[in-house]
Amino acid sequence: MAELEYNFKEIEKKWQGRWAEKDIFKTKHDDTRKKYYLLEMFPYPSGRLHMGHVRNYTIGDLMARFMTMKGFNVLHPMGWDSFGLPAENAAIQHNIPPYKWTTDNINHMKSQFAKLGFSYDWSREVATYKPEYYKWNQWVFVKMFEKGLAYRKNAPVNWCPQCATVLANEQVEDGKCWRCKSEVTQKELNQWFFKITAYAEDLLQGHEELKDGWPERVLTMQRNWIGKSHGLTINFKLESGEDFPIYTTRPDTVYGVTYMVIAPEHPFLERIKDTNVQDFIARMKKQSLIDRLAEDKEKEGIDTGIKVINPFNGDKVPLYVGNFVLMEYGTGMIMSVPAHDSRDFAFAKKYGIPIKLVIDNPASPIDVNAMTDAYVEDGINVNSGPFTGLSNREAIEKISDYAEKNGIGKRTVNFRIKDWLISRQRYWGCPIPAVYCDTCGIQMVPEKDLPVILPIDVDFHGSSQSPLASMESFINTACPACGGKARRETDTMDTFVDSSWYFAKFASPHSKDMFDDEVNYWMPVDQYIGGIEHAVLHLLYARFFNMVLYDLGLIKVKEPFTRLLTQGMVIKDGAKMSKSLGNVVDPDEIIDAFGADTVRMFMLFASPPDKDLDWSEKGVEGCYRFIGRVWRMVVKYRNFITTETIEHEKLTTALKSLRGELHRTVKSVTKDISERLQYNTAIARMMELVNAVYQCDEKEIASAQGRAVISEVLFKLIPMLNVFTPHVAEELWEMIGGGGFLYNQPWPDFDDALTAKEEIEIVFQVNGKIRSKAQVSSSITKDEMEEMAIADPKISSIIAGKEIVKKIVIPGKLVNIVIKG
RNA sequence: GCCGAAGUGGUGAAAUUGGUAAACACAGCGGACUCAAAAUCCGCCGAUGGCAACAUCUUGAGGGUUCGAGUCCCUCCUUCGGCACCA
């Protein structure tokens, strides 16, 4: 009997070998079936898979196998986000060249993928560190440069001292570097940017298309990040007559302006000679932006002595320099209305600036001298010239109309999102294809000379500096325009550029050009799966990049990801598994102890995919037990397999009920997977079915009709198991003589007529409280239910002598009798 | 402050359209098998009271709508996530 033990090691090896041998996961264009592109976010090849990866890819594999069984032509590729800083750190610390370190890691992780039995089409593998891939980063970069979407500018940028490179705004979290968590500082540097702001409106509009398929919270995070606001730019004037434009979202308060504030970095301030003011500006500029904007930071300012004229009422108000005004937002200058803005109120109190009420509370009039904070609610305009008496909501529109008609203002839309800083002072990334010539200035490398190859034989000498920066053989080149001496850009691209289009490359991985026609057969990705942490990073960048590719005519869809599933984290002892906390569980160890099928099932059973999952070794054991229970059941009944047809009406009650359970299980498992994305309950339903088989009398199952029923059970249950535990499912399929790869079998169907229970339990309530229950035939009528309720001894004793107000009968569920007194 | 998600047994969690709260599993307890243990199979398992039948209570708190609320509405509390001197 030894060969009939559940030996997961042998089984998993056997089927992984057969799948590979027959190359069954390879995908081709096929017009006879509907396409389905399923993608999980590709990993950074850090060396080993962690549980988060296992969870992500297990969910993806389930959906890929399910859609395949449902008859779709499924694209399910995998690749490597293989540029990035950890490779350089390994090089510096252990003197391993980044290329070798990365390649070794890819090979190791690929073997781990194989051990998990994922259904990837490896013939489409893509790795971003390969010249044939990153050539197209450079090619698109050149196109973007030509369109003004890639540009170089001097700007204050985020600098991570630990990583020795600049960072995009999206990569600074809470003032800290997203990768190494060290404090980010500000530096004024000449850097390359992608003009994502040009697509701010499109990125926002695109949400309309995504709102059914994406989690609400991801859309919200992106909306907040894009930060669209509607307002009015008002041309205040200096006494000299010069324009002094400011942006406000509260034009209704313009009659209440009592001072103006300007950012310390504003070039306007160069004209001020006053040494006190210049000292203040110098001091403010020294504070990093992060310090200045810290939450509890005291607002500081100084009067410049300059007066600004309000175009609405002619008021002359003082101009202050203030540390809280941002140069990058609006015009870098603001109007201040202390009566109706808390920050302005505090500042005015501190510097003794007058406060002027222009919006009153209609419910309880405000005494401006008694105010302890600004009045920021809606109200009625007062002291507002011709606009006095309007509701402030109305005043916003009327004042804006007036400003536009009289040339003193213009309705303006502002966005908080800033351009994407993409240059990195690092070695292990895609070279930026720019050349600097003293005569011709910035030049792009011509298309015929692409790719600019990143040299891989480099020596770090233990230094944290990028070796490119001092590599003369790389730097020295000829100017593409004049042929004279020129120098290459030594910065590389943010690795988020690499991952902004890989999903499209999977669709035509071997094309000579960036893509071939296949890209538009497969795109968009129908279902994308990955972590929530990319909500405003990768998921925003990729949408932007895809829109650029759309405008270049390379891709026919504007939005690359139709549906998005953000899977939860893997938690142990109340915290995310991480090396620093020491609560990491190595997937390899668990696979060795229980098998890949068990690990996969646990990942799907312990919680719904979008919620966090609590790691529990006991829970893993439970899944292992369930697989064993199925195994023993199949071994026990495998000799009963028959092709005899079932005569349903002739079945015994027990067999009828088992068969009903089977069809109900298929129905709910199908729905849980395809509609509800709730794999934990799908597994629970299968457990119930297996429990029902164990509950069924063996002699009944051994009967002729019993054999037919158990055959049906096995021939439907095992294909369902395939998407959760593919190795053992294939083995059991072979055991019952299923034939062919289970991977290629159709998903089991069910007969809806058989899903109805013959006998159901109904409840009898009095005033909504359950007082009695009864087993009845499912064909019972409403009238019969009502009669039964009244006749029920418990019910009748409760309602005896009471007035019945009404009776509510819910067919197949309950009877509720409402009584008085 | 603004926006979003969540709060259910000892634990992970179910409850699909407002209709039997706690499915399924983990842990625990008991039984069968065994010389014994493991494995396996079977049973019990929200709280309180009761020998029991049973009764009462129970989905963060308090109100409301309804014959009936975990689910809908209002107020509040807590936790997590995002944005935040953005004018």
Image: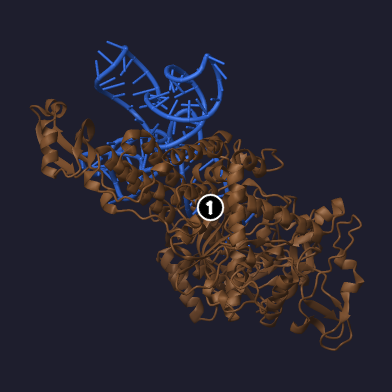
| In-front residue for pair A305/A637 | A637
Name the chain under label 1. Answer: A
| In-front residue for pair B27/A373 | B27
Residue at 62% from the left image edge and 71% from the top image edge: A505
Q: Quadrant of residue A387?
A: bottom left
Using the rendered image of the protein, determine whether residue A371 is visible from the camera's viewpoint.
no
The quadrant of the image that shows the C terminus of chain A is top left
The tint chain A carries is brown
Q: Secondary structure at mark 1?
A: helix
Q: Give how far across and how far down residue A12 sits, in percent.
A: 59, 47
Chain coloured blue in the rendered structure: B
Q: Callout 1, which amino acid?
A: Ile
| In-front residue for pair A726/A276 | A726
Q: Give how far across and how far down residue A475 sits, in percent.
A: 87, 74
Residue picked out by circle 1: A59
Residue at 39% from the left image edge and 46% from the top image edge: A641
Residue at 69% from the left image edge and 75% from the top image edge: A136
What scheme was used to colour the molecule?
by chain
